[in-house]
Image (cartoon, rainbow, N blue to C red):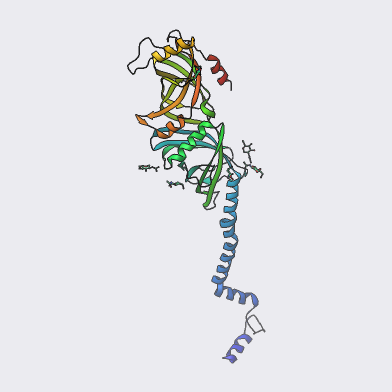
Amino acid sequence: MAHEKTETIHHDPEGRSDWSGPPKSSRLGRVCSKWWWLFFLLFVIIVLAVVLPIVYIAYPKIARRGSGDSTLQFTSLTIQNATPDSVEMGFSQIFYSNTSTSQPTLYPFNASFYMLDNDNNPPFASIQSPKIVKISNDTETDVPPQLVNITHMDEFTRYLRLALASESYTIALRGNGGMSTGGMPKTGIDYDKNITMNGFDGFTAFGILSFGVLDEAEADRTNAIGEAAIVNPTIMTLGLGDVTFALSVNGTDIGVATLNNLVLTPGYQQVEIRAVMDQPAVVGMVLALQNPVLPIDFTGGSSTVDGQQIPYFTAMLKDIVLQNNIDVTKSVESSGLVDRWSLIEWNSR
Ligand SMILES: *[C@@H]1O[C@H](CO)[C@@H](O)[C@H](O)[C@H]1NC(C)=O
Ligand SMILES: *[C@@H]1O[C@H](CO)[C@@H](O)[C@H](O)[C@H]1NC(C)=O
Ligand SMILES: *[C@@H]1O[C@H](CO)[C@@H](O)[C@H](O)[C@H]1NC(C)=O
Ligand SMILES: *[C@@H]1O[C@H](CO)[C@@H](O)[C@H](O)[C@H]1NC(C)=O
Ligand SMILES: *[C@@H]1O[C@H](CO)[C@@H](O)[C@H](O)[C@H]1NC(C)=O
Ligand SMILES: *[C@@H]1O[C@H](CO)[C@@H](O)[C@H](O)[C@H]1NC(C)=O
């Protein structure tokens, strides 16, 4: 065998004298063609070793940092169609980001709202945030109103009372979602955003514009009607239903006022007040005080929607105590806008 091999090499038409083996390049080629799959595998491993950390470690980190750098500002929050254990809730938000380049797509997630006074608070509401495509700095997105079951009634009530009492307050929005940028794969993202909003500031921007006694009580016993001005300094729309206030003077009850189907909308609004007054008691006071203008206290009573009392709104309303000076002797025809000045004052706030 060795002899034959020597012979072959001697007769190499290209006159090669080196029979120790084929030229290096061709030997390499043969090794390559035999072990190509190994090289390919190595190549793939190297590529993956470089790309995977970028895609699955660096990119999610960048994505998370991008999300951490961003802030959310709410531009509207609506709570309507209340039942004793659910509401329809929706909001709009503006996303502000420091990273001007990436325009991530945010995938739907369960956004939960929390009070911030304790780390272990359960969420007071959870709402499904929709997919938001190519979100960029200063984009406004709508999360349309949806049914929210109130699973932690105490927490939801605490939230409403905070919103009522505060000039400004902060809550947290948290959830686990996903995001992707460009062709990158979806990566997980933990949301934890503090959101600061104006509150109703004690509902103090409430005043009686006009008030008058009816000559004859209506079928529902209403014997006085008037008009109230309300300024809602928040971005919230609150469908409170039929709202009652207990009327009293210096601790003595004189009747009940009702604001039917009250929907507080941001800004200024005027609403009708219908009152059932204890006229003998009122007349007695006017005579005793020798003054037709009574300092009437309005104490929040209850909220009713479609005949059902709404416990969380009722609890919130009970925190309201307001005083208005009202001339209770005027008839509807002669009653003027007694507190017109307040309207002007609130409007110019
Ligand atoms: C933008 O980045 C600066 C500096 O890192 C930081 O102070 C600021 O709060 C960031 N803004 C937002 C909207 O996250
Ligand atoms: C984001 O938008 C805000 C408001 O328009 C602007 O003040 C801010 O400079 C923008 N930030 C970037 C990184 O573009
Ligand atoms: C949303 O998240 C909250 C808080 O983790 C949870 O209680 C609720 O069941 C979740 N809702 C859905 C629809 O996943
Ligand atoms: C709310 O509760 C009702 C009845 O318990 C249920 O049918 C509905 O799926 C719940 N909705 C949400 C968004 O959790
Ligand atoms: C939100 O505010 C709370 C209370 O002020 C604070 O402890 C928490 O670190 C804040 N969270 C974020 C994400 O800024
Ligand atoms: C309110 O009632 C108290 C005692 O109950 C009395 O001293 C006071 O004069 C009353 N004020 C008015 C304005 O009627």
Dividing the image into 4 quarters, which one contains the N terminus?
A: bottom right
Image spot of residue 157 (x, y percent): 46, 37
Q: Can you see residue 143? A: no
Image spot of residue 158 (x, y percent): 48, 37
Image spot of residue 128 (x, y percent): 45, 43
Count of marks, rendered view: 0
Is 326 in front, or is 52?
A: 326
298 in relation to 333, above or below: below
Image spot of residue 118 (x, y percent): 53, 44
- Whether residue 297 sits left or right of residue 280 in the image: it is right
- Residue for point 47% across, 14% down: 210
**Quadrant location, ligand no. 2:** top right
- Residue for point 46% across, 25% down: 299
Is 297 in front, or is 335?
A: 297
- Residue for point 43% across, 24% down: 245
Furthest-left residue in this view: 219
29 in relation to 220, above or below: below
Is 99 in front, or is 114?
A: 114
Furthest-right residue in this view: 17
Dividing the image into 4 quarters, which one contains the C terminus?
A: top right
236 in relation to 226, above or below: below
Q: Can you see residue 201? A: yes
